[in-house]
Amino acid sequence: MKFISALLLAMMLVAPAAAETVLIRDGRVVTNGAAGTIENGDVLIIDGRISAVGANIAAPRGARVVEAQGRYVTAGAFAAMSEIGLSEISGSGAQNDANVEGALVAASADAGRAFNPGVTAIAVTRMEGVTRAAIAPSSTATMFGGRGALVSLDGGDDSVFRQSAFMVVELGEVGARRTGGSRAAVWPAFEAALRDAREYPGRYRSGQGGAVLNELDAAALQPFARGQGLFLVHVENAADIRRLIRFKRANPSMRFAIHGGAEAWQVAEDLARADIPVIVDPLSNLPDRMERLSARLDNAALLHAAGVTVAIAPAPGTVDAHQARLVLQLAGNAVANGMPWDAAFSAVSRTPAEIFGVGAQIGRLERNYLADVVIWDGDPLQVTSAPTAVFIEGAEQPLVSRQTRLRDRYNPVRRATQP
Amino acid sequence: MRSTLHPFVALVASLALAACATTPTTEDEADDGPLPFASTYTPRPSTPTLIRGATVFDGNGAELAGADVLMQDGRIVSVGAGLSAPEGATIIDGAGRFVTPGIIDAHSHLGVYPSPSISATSDGNEATQPNTAEVWAEHSVWPQDPGFLRAVAGGITTLHVLPGSANLFGGRGVTLRPVLGARTVQEMKFPDAPHSLKMACGENPARVYGGRNSSPSTGMGNVAGYRQAFINARRYARQLESAENGEGEPPDRDLEMETLAGVLNGDILLQWHCYRADEMANAIEISHEFDFEIAAFHHAVEAYKITDLLVREDICAAMWADWWGFKIEAYDGIRENIPFVHAGGGCAIVHSDSEVGIQRLNQEAAKALADGRRAGVEITRAEAWTWLSRNPARALHIDEETGTLEAGRRADVVVWSADPLSSYAVAERVYIDGALIYERGALVDPPSDFELGQTYRERAQ
């Protein structure tokens, strides 16, 4: 509850000062909620929130009316894992705040305090219908990847709407590599770290210090170790996932979601029973690591069919700062491989919001939800589709980016028609 | 830009002639042996196949509704309405389905960077010196790479496997058929397809060697490295030519020089990794200085800025639909790169450079098509398919063999469940040389030995 009120406070801070009243009329409204998809539906936006959704809503006085002409109207997409805002250019020796080196900071690394809403990628990504993202560092020196944050892509000063939303922890091959080279070290180290965190600050003030964590990391880890925050666990193979399920059974107060989970389909029913959501990459079908030997294209569909909560994002190792816009293509590929459309669209909008604890505010077109609304020129999961309008908290976003400026400068069609 | 389909014959024949013209030695006699590493590819058995009543993209930019496609003896016989089936033909119902030429990926590292990706299998960059024109990618190709099956399932019928881009001269690339079950790379080699030479512009060579405090460490170091190598190669080629004409001794065989000389005489195609417009222009200058041709720029993130140059020089651009920002030389990537090159009259190619991307190049073309249309470029979906088959075939000099559904071409054909320029279409049937190589859902065992019998995998059955 505490974080909800903090969230509400943050929401108030970022609400546009003078949000328009907008009525989007006659769309194919994908509510992501109980009302399902409403043909010829309307969406009324007042003060940055959804005021009403349904058929034949009367336009309030002064409302701007946007005719959707039967097009898809959906909640904005939510990139369930990204490094957007953590670099302008990720390579080439340019500053990249997703990479945390050295022993000083790992669990305490804080993506929300590195995020830059001014990066070029924000406008590039937003104009393709992605309005929210979960961000985290890509690597640290330990099994703890640091604290992730939830961000809006409206480019505003207050884009980070939830700090410390989750703690990334590596409990598979990557975790092994950072923990003495072996899985045999991973779980003992993880459990020791949790003890250090739970006993913070006592054992540090007494001079005893931590068994494995420095004071900074112990402090950062404490709320998560006490069940007050979500661990986003990178594991891929079925054996590691089973270990996580057993651990959760023994520690029911702790909260986990999985990122990766290439072999999760093998333990789908156990995951459903343990209520552990999985963020999968529907393109992850290669045995490219020993922990992904049975990766398959219908992983998302199989998990969904078994009742697992499924979100969609690039696999660990392929998360980047520039292509969060491709989550919709990923979801389309999940559909091509058997996932129902509604579940796949939810997996890149509503479900990430729910996994990260903001599902009461974001991810649906329902009354009182934040008005992140996108109108599309086609099926949003089709690679050929693009938004014709994007609203974030009721404010219409320009469909302009550095890329469209370059496009317009070099467009051969436009140049040919110029005098 | 055309050249013979026999890249080595000329060079090795000239060496052989030279050997005959001088006093034979044991070493020279060795040069008279058969061409090493020749293709042993043979088409799989096929039956005559008639696909009836499909929407067909012919690979030359035309779309035919309700058309039939007839394949026999490994070749396209005819495309049109109301074709009759030869005796014993397999009839495929094309209703609601789409038929296209197989996709050709002009830029792949399958086999040289296979799955699983571990240090021992990282086999695509001989990053030990900036000029390794002597190495051949095919000698690193692992035919058991599970990626080949995934590529075929995405409609790939031909792929060009290149060394990586760590070096100025990365080595020779090879054109392969992803026939499943091949035991050797020779069994995959596209018959008579020319080799390529992979060169690399820009950040990668400068970073790799600059990081070792050796040359090149800058863009100017890159260019000096290219030019010096071609100066040396020209000398080598001239010595060869002179010896062939009975003047003087041939030079000692030198694998590096053989590759570069092959570029100078047009037998080896130049595939040049180059992102930026200005660097592509520099590359063109070098091609003029040493009088060779560039088959294609690869990645060519800024091709849209110099479409006129590419058209003038008859150089293809092999591009991603939308990759950008991962390094500074990719900062100006735009979604309209492919359609703008197309609109300018250029030879646009959709390539993957990725074991994931190669599985759905049709979706990349679909994105480029849609983004181009939004920018005002008029493109039909059948024209967009030329980016996936005819144009890469051109850049690989196999366009008289494959890339379109013209009569007589190799029957490299994909039957799609729906319009392939979409997210939801899947390849249902993939034919290579008229033989059904892949049928969706029909595989019992994984074709790669690597995947056979893995405990985890078998549980999937």
Image (tube, helix red, strand yellow):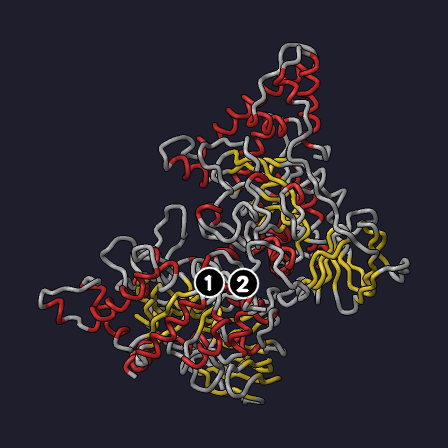
State left or right for residue A245 relative to residue A56. Answer: left
> Which amino acid type is marked by label 1?
Ala
Residue B141 makes an appearance in the image: yes
Subunit ID for the residue under disc 2 = A
User: Circles 1 and 2: CB distance less than 8 Å?
Assistant: yes
- Residue drawn at 55 percent across, 30 percent down: B134
> Which amino acid type is marked by label 2?
Leu
Compared with residue A161, is residue B439 higher up or lower down, i.e. above or below? Answer: above
| Quarter where residue B218 is shown | top left
What whole-number distance in Å separates the C-alpha atoms at marks 1 and 2?
8 Å
| Of the image marks 1 and 2, the number of the one nearer the N terminus | 2
Report x, y in % for residue A134: 39, 68
Front position in the image: A150 or A204: A204
Label drawn at residue A315: 1
- Residue drawn at 68 percent across, 36 percent down: B38
| Quarter where residue B28 is shown | top right
Compared with residue B131, is residue B416 higher up or lower down, i.e. above or below? Answer: below
Count of numbered marks: 2
- On the rendered image, what quadrant is the C terminus of chain B found in? bottom right
Front position in the image: A135 or A396: A135
What kind of element bears circle 1?
Answer: loop
Label drawn at residue A283: 2
| Quarter where residue B347 is shown | top right
Q: Residues within 10 Å of mark 1 (few under 14, many from 20)?
A: many
Compared with residue B217, is residue B85 higher up or lower down, i.e. above or below? Answer: below
Report x, y in % for residue B281: 55, 36
- Residue drawn at 34 percent across, 71 percent down: A231
